[in-house]
């Protein structure tokens, strides 16, 4: 049990660093998503879907600087919380609840699986 808890904390910290790497433009979203650990931790799944949403809003972020800043702050909060190994607030986790299936399940069918889930996520 203790080993599982330690792995969960390490995964959260790793994911927090991945989110930071996207925000600082050291890594693209797609590359970061591919590195997400296989996890059923709602905190990690939330970060995963927040990054998908971030990528989907690229055009809006370009047009609306206030929206971009707000979304960056939101992702920074997620990264900061996960790097500390803490749980995200329940309301943030609930925002993405409909999409939780585990982070790796979205990639099982490769690029086509990702596209299918991405379209479902943005309601196409």
Image: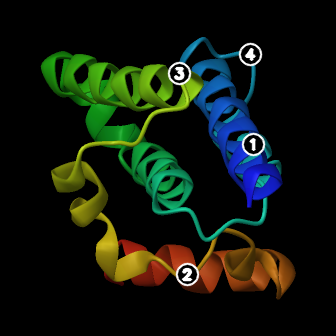
The disc at residue 117 is 2
- Residue at position x 44%, y 56% from top? 46
N-terminal of the pair, mark 4 or mark 3, is 4
- Residue at position x 82%, y 84% from top? 108
Image quarter of residue 102? bottom right
Is residue 77 left or right of 5 when viewed as pictured? left
Question: Disc 3 on helix, strand or loop?
Answer: loop
The disc at residue 6 is 1
Please report contact status of discs 2 and 1: CB closer than 8 Å, yes or no.
no
Question: Disc 2 on helix, strand or loop?
Answer: helix
Alpha carbons under labels 4 and 3: distance apart: 21 Å
Taking 18 as reference, is 43 above or below it? Answer: below
Q: Which residue is mark 3?
A: 84
In this rendered view, identify the residue nearer to me: 48 or 86. Answer: 86
Q: Position of residue 64 (x, y in %)?
A: 18, 25
N-terminal of the pair, mark 3 or mark 2, is 3
- Residue at position x 60%, y 11% from top? 24
Alpha carbons under labels 4 and 2: distance apart: 25 Å
Q: Position of residue 45 (x, y in %)?
A: 52, 61
Q: Nearer the viewer, mark 2 or mark 1?
A: 1
Q: Quadrant of the C terminus?
A: bottom left
Q: Which residue is mark 4?
A: 26
N-terminal of the pair, mark 4 or mark 2, is 4
Can residue 77 be spotted in the picture?
A: yes
Image quarter of residue 21? top right
Question: Disc 4 on helix, strand or loop?
Answer: loop
Q: Nearer the viewer, mark 3 or mark 1?
A: 1
Question: Disc 1 on helix, strand or loop?
Answer: helix
Q: Nearer the viewer, mark 1 or mark 4?
A: 1
Alpha carbons under labels 3 and 2: distance apart: 29 Å
């Amino acid at each position: 049990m203790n080993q599982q808890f330690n792995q969960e904390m390490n995964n959260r910290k790793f994911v927090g660093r991945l989110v930071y790497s996207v925000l600082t433009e050291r890594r693209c979203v797609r590359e970061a998503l591919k590195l997400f650990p296989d996890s059923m931790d709602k905190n990690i799944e939330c970060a995963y879907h927040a990054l998908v949403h971030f990528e989907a809003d690229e055009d809006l972020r370009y047009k609306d600087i206030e929206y971009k800043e707000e979304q960056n702050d939101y992702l920074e909060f997620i990264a900061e919380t996960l790097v500390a190994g803490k749980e995200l607030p329940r309301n943030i986790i609930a925002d993405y609840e409909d999409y939780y299936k585990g982070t790796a399940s979205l990639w099982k069918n490769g690029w086509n699986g990702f596209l299918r889930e991405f379209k479902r996520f943005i309601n196409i």
